[in-house]
Image (cartoon, grey):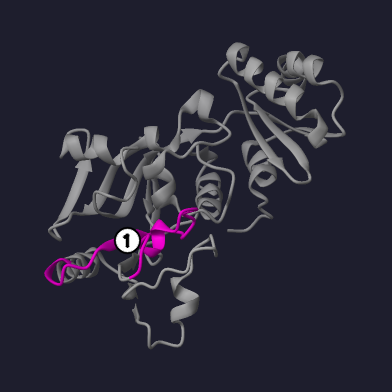
Amino acid sequence: SLTTPSSSAYNTDRYGHNLIFEFKPTAIYHPATNEDAADAVQCAAAFNISIAPRSGGHSFEGYCEGGKDGALVIDVNKFQQFSLNPTTGIATVGAGTRLGPIYSRLWRAGGYFVPAGVCPSVGVGGHALGGGVGMLARKYGMLTHNIVSVTLIDAQGTIRKVSATSNPDLFWALRGAGGGNFGVVTEFQFQAHKAPAVITTMIYQYPLSHFPAVIDAFVALGQIATDDLTSLMFPSSRGIDLKVNYLGPKDAALSAIGPLLEMTGPPATMDVREGTWYEAATLWNWLRGGD
């Protein structure tokens, strides 16, 4: 489907996550196949129109709207395919899929996961190509480290399979060296992992007045923590949220987080839970079951 400035859905379709940006694309195109996307790239090239791939529209800088007026946005939200090879653990994921459904589908496929972010509405395309840090990063790396291959439409409109052995320079560039600048990705293959038997999730909240102590403790903990512990800090006008994930039981988790609590003092609130990976993911990602 094609949304143009004369379409009734244009103003709805053109906006991304950050509403401060009001760029006006020439059109927003929603291809259904690789061939559709290739045709769009060739058409844009013929008329010297810049292209902005869009997976979930979560770019804070508005790049998914073109970063300027007049771009052709190629929105890959129709690419929702999913499969998992139980022998290799390789997951095939459409580039328009959001993180929440990916977590749910992998879990239901046999207790698998990929190490990715904490917001379920983020599209996997920009997230994976830009890095993809999350609550399992210290142990399993960022999502971009777990890319096995991608299907991509290059600047000439050619459909390419890109991996460590096929177009290796492009494969290197895609994994963190410029996000969506090297083509329109329509499909990923990720190395998925079997979830640990138990994960402990700890959420600590502090008032903003504790910020100096919390940031010092956060940095210090990162230098001594094992790879089983990953922590993220979220300052806001309400206070400071410190989310900690430990790959193991509650008693070991509390021992691992002890040095941080000694530096910060008691938090205003705390929530410590032991459970499965998916139960932990519902806490990190504000998921409520389903898909």
* Residue shown at the point (71%, 15%) measured from the top left: 256
Residue under pointer 1: 52
Is residue 59 visible to the viewer in this orientation of the structure?
yes
Q: How busy is the neighbourhood of tag 1: few (under 14 within 10 Å), some, or many (20 plus)? A: many
| Image location of residue 231, percent across then percent down | 63, 28
Identify whether 64 is placed above or below 124.
Answer: below
Q: What secondary structure do most residues of the magenta stretch adopt?
A: loop
Q: Is residue 62 left or right of residue 289?
A: left
* Residue 2 x %, y %: 33, 79
**Residue range of the region highlighted in magenta in the rendering:** 45-69
In this rendered view, identify the residue nearer to me: 205 or 69.
Answer: 69
Give the quarter of the image for residue 201.
top right
| 134 to 187, vertically: above or below | above
Closest to the observer: 42 or 80? Answer: 42
Which residue type does callout 1 highlight? Answer: Ala
Q: Nearer the viewer, residue 84 or 129?
A: 129
Residue 74 lies in what quarter of the image?
bottom left
Residue drawn at 67 percent across, 22 percent down = 218
Residue 68 forms part of the magenta stretch = yes
x%, y% of residue 105? 51, 51
Name the side, left or right, on which 280 lies relative to 251.
left
Quadrant in the picture for residue 277: top right
How many numbered dots are placed on residues in this image? 1
